[in-house]
Amino acid sequence: MKKITIIVLSALILSACSDFLNIKPEGTSSSTGLDYTKAENIFKPVSAAYASMRSYGSHDMPYIAAFEITSDNADKGSTPEDGPESLAMDNFTVTLTNSMVNSLWVGYFDIVSAANNAIFQMSKFYEAQANAENKEYVLQCEGEAKFIRAYAYFNLVRLFAKVPKIDKTMTAEELADVKPSTPAELYAFIEKDLEEAIAVLPESYSKAFAGRITVYTAHALKAKVHLYQAEYAAVAEHAGKVMESGRYRLLSDFREVFSIDGENSEESLFEIQCSDLGMSTGTNVPYFEYAYHQGPRGGKNASNMQGWGFCVPSADLIKFYEDRGEVIRPATTLLRAGTTTPEGDYIDTGENCPLVYNGKVYTPSAYNEWSYNGYGFDHNVRILRYSDVLLMYAEAVARGASEYAQAGMTAQAAFDWVRSRAGLPSVGLDVDAIIDERRAELAMEEDRFFDLVRTGKTDKLKGFVKGKHEVFPIPAQQMQLNLNLIQNNGY
């Protein structure tokens, strides 16, 4: 069962599920019937926006396939005949009717819709609250919703390039008439949301609210948003502000970072919160199948260590680690069938099943309490880690940005810290070395494909066509719903 901190947040999420989790893609939600004078209701619409990120389209198989299986780090996995649409992602044979692509679109616009609803509700709460402290809390909650909307749009612009900018609740007719915005317009919108969030978000929360978005979460995402636009001075500034805070560190044990007990640690800036709450039944249990779908496929003796075995480390990634002489990171990242983990779990082998799995979602059997479909349900999805911030800072300076004076360390020191935890010696601050370090550090965490795209290093991706596969097709279903949408090049 997940530790108590996540249960408190989940309970708040559950209290709003019936009103907010059934929002139609890009749609509106009706009045919630909330009493805006009651301070205890303020967080409910925002908790629903958090919960909307725990959806199949936004952070389950479509996310795993689009952000990682497409890269040189991973293969489809599972059995040869299983998951043909994931295989299409892997081979860059995706069509307009691929349901995973449509699920990505729907999943992220669901998040936008939930965030827009929360922002609208916050305006009502602000008017109704007489207490100055409560008004300040309303603005803080609005900042969380704006971060969530910015995060959803950051993924949408990377996935599809040109999508509609939806910044308020709309009727179905209005939604069907919205024209797509350019990437430049979308990035400006994302930056504005993050700037407004930074102005009101707190530096931290009590342990009871571990996992909520802070000002440093927003700085970290803003650094990444600027990284994708090659705005390196801004990358250094916002990554530097996270470093300046002194609130984050790299855990000494790389394996602990991806453990259940290591969730929401001092290395974490943003995770999708998941838990089975220790329950085997119930429709409102906020478990998630991100880890389950990547868990070891196993055989007849797999018991509660059974997953679906998708998104497995590629031979290319394994060789990459071997060529670098890496030991520490692959020991966690590569979960090999036919071996026993340090926690005592035997990883069973199965006929036509992979020989190695994503070890970063490994969940010890003690946490898999259900007799069926229970593997990894407690496993949070890691979105932003401090090592990512350190590497973004190092890359920005290596590409010509000035050091951020208050960062507390140089770019070289930040780079060396990531490498030293992995048991590697210092090397010079070289851009290619930093990109390789990002691969070694963040492998199997849905970062690599778009790193390859932004750095122009897609030549090694089999089937990738430059000028086409940097983005995915606008789903045919969405083209039918909104005739203003423009199909991406080559599709």
Image (spheres, rainbow, N blue to C red):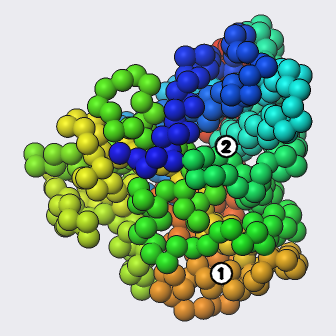
Residue 377: image x %, image y %? 37, 42
The residue that appears at 46% across and 61% down in the rendered structure is 262
Q: Amino acid at mark 1?
A: Phe
Residue 438: image x %, image y %? 59, 70
Residue 402: image x %, image y %? 88, 78
The residue that appears at 46% across and 46% down in the rendered structure is 4
Q: Amino acid at mark 2?
A: Asn
- Give above or below for 154 relative to 335: above
Q: Nearer the viewer, mark 1 or mark 2?
A: 1
In the picture, the quarter occupied by the C terminus is top right
The residue that appears at 79% across and 48% down in the rendered structure is 201
**Which residue has dot 1 on it?**
415
Would you say 2 lies left or right of 52 here? left
Tell me if label 1 and label 2 are in contact, CB under 8 Å: no
Disc nearer the start of the sequence (1/2): 2
The residue that appears at 43% across and 49% down in the rendered structure is 3
Q: Is residue 486 visible?
A: no
**Which residue has dot 2 on it?**
155
Answer few, some or many: residues within 10 Å of disc 1's Cα (few below 14, many 20 plus, some between 14 and 19): many
In the picture, the quarter occupied by the N terminus is top left
Would you say 105 lies left or right of 4 here? right
Q: Quadrant of residue 38?
A: top right
